[in-house]
Amino acid sequence: MLRLTSSAGLLLLAASFAASADCASAETAFSVYGGYQTAPHSSIEINGADAFTAGWEGRSFNWPAYWGARATYWLDRYKQPNLGIALDFSHAKVYADDATFAKSGWSHFEFTDGLNLLTLNALYRFPIKDSKWTPYLGLGAGINVPHVEVTRPSGRTYGYQFGGPTVQAQAGVSYSFAKNWDAFVEYKANYSWVDVEIDSGDRMKTGILTNAVNLGVSFRF
């Protein structure tokens, strides 16, 4: 089982991708963003049996905050200037609500440092002639690496694990406000299949859908 001590390794991958992208395309961009992220209820399985339904809170602006970073290159050199490939890391997170604790008997349950998502995505942009506004769409897939925090009568789990696959969809619009600089707003959704080990050798599975409205800036070079 893969365990990580921080999200630094994921960010290093993103930085390496950005550095190598310059060799493949005439236009490369690095973006950072934050925003408001939520998640609906999800069913919790323990050792393959339904245990309870968890209600989730996003608490986007509580520390550690929700944020993300993305490296994108556009395929100008391949005569596809509106098609891009992006490596996207987001520090999503979810906290179980009070109703979940009442019915589960657990005292602590969250993925808050965080439900880390790393995806490879295809982006397509729709330039508007004589306009600084550019809508775009994206689809991708990757992995989730949650920081599993569970405390229940039988024991405590606290640490990073490899959770499983993640899929991503996004739609947004960017605005060029200065040379080489864009601002953007987007909606981004991720569905993550989370399969992790908790205390006593038990396995916990759930599917978490995160919805986020992001605001960010991009530097093009």
Image: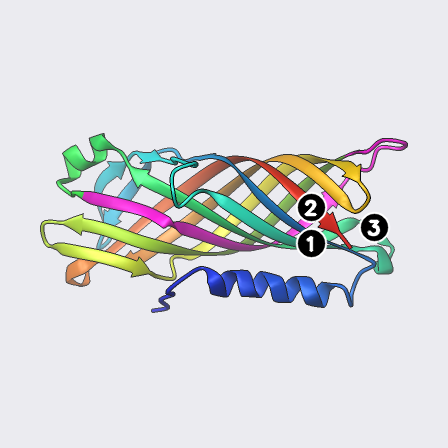
Answer whether residue 118 is magenta in the image.
yes
Dominant secondary-structure state across the stretch colored magenta: strand
Q: Amino acid at mark 1?
A: Thr
Q: Amino acid at mark 3?
A: Pro
Query: Which residue is disc 1 drawn over?
Result: 72
Answer whether residue 101 is magenta in the image.
no
Q: In x, y percent, where is residue 47?
A: 21, 55
Tell which of 179 and 197 is nearer to you: 179
**What label does residue 157 carry, if any?**
none
Query: Which residue is disc 2 drawn over?
Result: 218
Query: Which residue is disc 3 drawn over?
Result: 81
Q: Amino acid at mark 2?
A: Ser
Q: Residue at x 29, y 45 (%)?
A: 110
Give above or below for 81 relative to 214.
below
The residue range painted magenta reads 108-133
Residue 145 figure quarter: bottom left
Q: Which circle, 1 or 2, is nearer the viewer?
A: 2
Between marks 3 and 1, how big is the CA–CA gap?
Answer: 12 Å
Circle 1/circle 2 CB separation < 8 Å: yes
Between disc 3 and disc 2, whose residue precedes? Answer: 3
Q: Residues within 10 Å of mark 3 (few under 14, many from 20)?
A: some
Q: Residues within 10 Å of mark 1 (few under 14, many from 20)?
A: many
Q: Residue at x 40, y 50 (%)?
A: 115
Q: Which circle, 3 or 2, is nearer the viewer?
A: 2
Between disc 1 and disc 2, whose residue precedes? Answer: 1
